[in-house]
Image: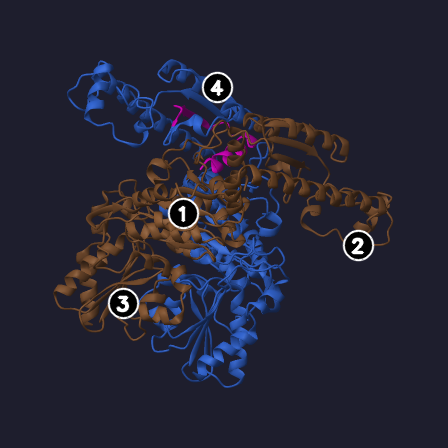
Chain colours: A blue, B brown
Amino acid sequence: MEGISSEAASLAGHLNLSKLIYLYDDNHISIDGDTDMAFTENRTARFEAYGWHVQQIQDGNDIEAVDEAINLAKADSRPSLIAIRTQIGYGLPTKAGTSSAHGEPPGEEELEGAKEKLGWPHQPRFLVPDDVKEHFETSLDKGDQLESQWKSDLNDYRDAYPDLATELDRRINRKLPDGWEKNLPNFEPDMKGMATRKASGATINAIAGVLPELFGGSADLAPSNKTWIDGTPSFQADTPEGRNFHFGVREHAMQGIVNGIAVHGGLIPYGGTFLVFSDYLRPSLRLAALSGYASITVFTHDSIGLGEDGPTHQPVEHLASLRAIPNLVTIRPGDANEVAYAWKVAIERRHGPTIFALSRQNIRIVDRQDYAPASNLEKGAYVLKDFGVDEPEIILMASGSEVALIVGAGERLAEEGANVRLVSFPSWELFEAQDQTYKESVFPPHIRKRLAVEAGVSQGWMKYTGAEGDMISVEKFGVSAPYQVIFEEYGFTIDNVYRHARKLIEA
Amino acid sequence: MEGISSEAASLAGHLNLSKLIYLYDDNHISIDGDTDMAFTENRTARFEAYGWHVQQIQDGNDIEAVDEAINLAKADSRPSLIAIRTQIGYGLPTKAGTSSAHGEPPGEEELEGAKEKLGWPHQPRFLVPDDVKEHFETSLDKGDQLESQWKSDLNDYRDAYPDLATELDRRINRKLPDGWEKNLPNFEPDMKGMATRKASGATINAIAGVLPELFGGSADLAPSNKTWIDGTPSFQADTPEGRNFHFGVREHAMQGIVNGIAVHGGLIPYGGTFLVFSDYLRPSLRLAALSGYASITVFTHDSIGLGEDGPTHQPVEHLASLRAIPNLVTIRPGDANEVAYAWKVAIERRHGPTIFALSRQNIRIVDRQDYAPASNLEKGAYVLKDFGVDEPEIILMASGSEVALIVGAGERLAEEGANVRLVSFPSWELFEAQDQTYKESVFPPHIRKRLAVEAGVSQGWMKYTGAEGDMISVEKFGVSAPYQVIFEEYGFTIDNVYRHARKLIEA
């Protein structure tokens, strides 16, 4: 876990985050024993190298010294590290200064011994002396005063700047401006199509005006992730009004920072990187899901379809592994218009994280006059089109760039007179949130010929294809080649989808 | 990605890895543009803080200076950083020193311009001047000499120390000692049982004598992960004979280091941490799978069954997300004796990584006189027991700590006269590697009443339960409580397994 703290500390130094004060409990003990077994770097020098203000205190029980150091830290314009030498389990007769004081309860004997040693009454078991209680109680008055002052200041502000105050209230209360969604872009039908990452960039810029709280960036991949907000500078120490955050090559810290901003409120933050690098930030994404943080992460280059960068950069197992995280909403939009509604879902989802998986390559933009509206994305899966006049004999389903493949195959089957249902399936979690009636309207239980197409591992798809269905998936790592070559080699062509569907129909 | 490099650099300094020389191509450019946008720390001071030998070169084209610095680095007893100021795309007329030189091909015009500027012939397109060719060819002779010398030294060594030379050959050729597996421990039946992490610790120590190449440790959780090899010290700069590696709180670097040792050969390396922290090291685990490295990772505290540490520490989605990675073998042994064979699989698997998911809590050790031998673990899933005289009417399957639950439920159903098959299912990947005949012998297609029990998300299990089967799983995050309380609350009791099985039988 050291990695993320190093990344964050470097960035905090770069941005001069002067409000940040670390109290480093330097007790020389880790779970394995003395920290000297693995951790002998010069920690204070490292933080100085990050551009931090660094202080050291030799005795953690010297309260005056700690207090003075905190005051100096507050006064400094840099983030501060206060390294405080302490003894873990202070007072425990035999466990003080040992790793067992970290991982184990001290037990009665040690506890009694510590009280003895520190001249503390044995009874009552939990004692708060009156003067301590009184001292703490002064914070109630102090808090009341600070709150009154804040409210009074805010009222003054409200009088002087009514519009800004309304906006501040809106942001603090995490409300969206009325009708903001009218700014979502509409993309014209296009056979050549558009990369969904590009549609995401266009969507960000279409809504950035009406949502001044939208704020984010990329882990050094802004030109690839299309995360840049035009007309506003980079967020830096001397340009805090900037809405574009340069996270550097620090994916893990990025997600932690996005989480932190989401918890703080006032802004709607997003991060961005390649989908394969979701592995780097997974622990913080999990925390967002567990804690209900409204973090948004834009993952682009979402399959073997990214092409030449090869298997190290080609996500194969990532959609499955992200869908496995409870309370995380994963959306892989099927075309540019679905991207706009994916952003709508993410912006409106205030109780948990949302991620997008977006393509590097162009994807056909289907004609929404012929096909169902893209707003159906909000239901997770929807009937994009029913070909034929009778009840469907087969259901073709896909997410992301593979939606264009089932559309192409469906068109061909329809020409041959087949009754075919096409289901665009951008999000399992959004679909699972629908009621049973809706679910069965999309996947009628008696229609068992079902084919799923997704350029990733099949894990979990059987829930929707059923045991009698079929799937075109990727069960091994990718290869380096132009994406058309890889897609052909791995079976992601209209021809191959058509053949699999034909086989199912005729079975 | 900065995180892992920080972790690794700190450890390299601690261990005085003097052979390590980083040439830092300090070109001031990242994909987003100038590194000053996000990366202004004092890099050389940071590496000095790690205990590295640091040099700076102002002009990367000064070959003599680079050569001299490398020689100084070789002579120093510390790892070395040589920070070399360069210009990216040197010579390109307009792209030199810009981020487009990083991410895009230069194109014909830039290429011609660079040749012009550097006084290089335009034709042939790829030119290796004769004197350069001659210079490089001297390395052939040099290599021959070095190889001859090495072979001659090795022969002398073989004459002087025939036994040690045989051992060296064995290790270099990644052969295991004959009969090494006879040292695998056998655990006596025990209703109270044993934590599988404890069985793993016992197995490590049972085979460490016959496998002197076994070498590993934990990311500061050795007492919890039970990864310590007795009778050998910690691996440190002054005790390189030690076989216990203290990785510190650096999970990501740990997996990278284990990968590196596995590629180098001569040792069989393993790492260890909590299963939930597999997220921290996932990128390096993926690389091991992609590259075919024989890395072993011991993950303990493998479900909500870890108890009081709560949801941050309770893996729920991790088995699914690890099983999604191609070429990774995930094993979750059902009792102590399966643990011994899990280690056998990992030790013998030399073309890809293997991980274990082990319990914190005790698990009943079944009596292998009554139940099938634990050696069946090597097949991934096996019939642990058929209760009743007729063909099974239901199959109960489970992995890890939940095997004891299906055993308990199976015993009760058997008392009531039911015909029940119990399948221990420690590894999907090992099972998928079996032939169809074996697979159908475990899961006969016509037996469709199937119940899976695993304390994790259900994703992917339908492949084995079928659409008509049932599963007891965990589809949300855990809670903090003693493990018996959580298991009761989440339905992981013999009673609940019995009830689900009864319902299926009677359906």
* Residue with the mark numbered 2: B108
Q: Position of residue A454 (x, y in %)?
A: 49, 65
State whether discs 1 and 4 lie on one chain. Answer: yes
* Residue with the mark numbered 3: B450
Q: Could you tell which of marks 1 and 4 lies nearer the N-terminus?
A: 4
Neighbour tally class for label 3: few under 14, some 14-19, many 20 plus, Cα within 10 Å? many
* Mark 3 or 1: the one toward you: 3
Neighbour tally class for label 1: few under 14, some 14-19, many 20 plus, Cα within 10 Å? many
Question: In which quadrant of the rendered image does the C terminus of chain A lie?
Answer: bottom left
A247 over A54 or under it: above or below? below
Neighbour tally class for label 2: few under 14, some 14-19, many 20 plus, Cα within 10 Å? few
Q: Would residue A291 be visible to someone looking at this image?
A: no
Q: Which residues are magenta?
A: A1-29
* Measured Cα–Cα span from mark 3 to mark 2: 64 Å
Q: State if disc 1 and disc 3 touch (CB < 8 Å).
A: no
* Measured Cα–Cα span from mark 3 to mark 1: 31 Å
Q: Of the numbered discs in the image, which one, if any, rests on residue A55?
A: 4
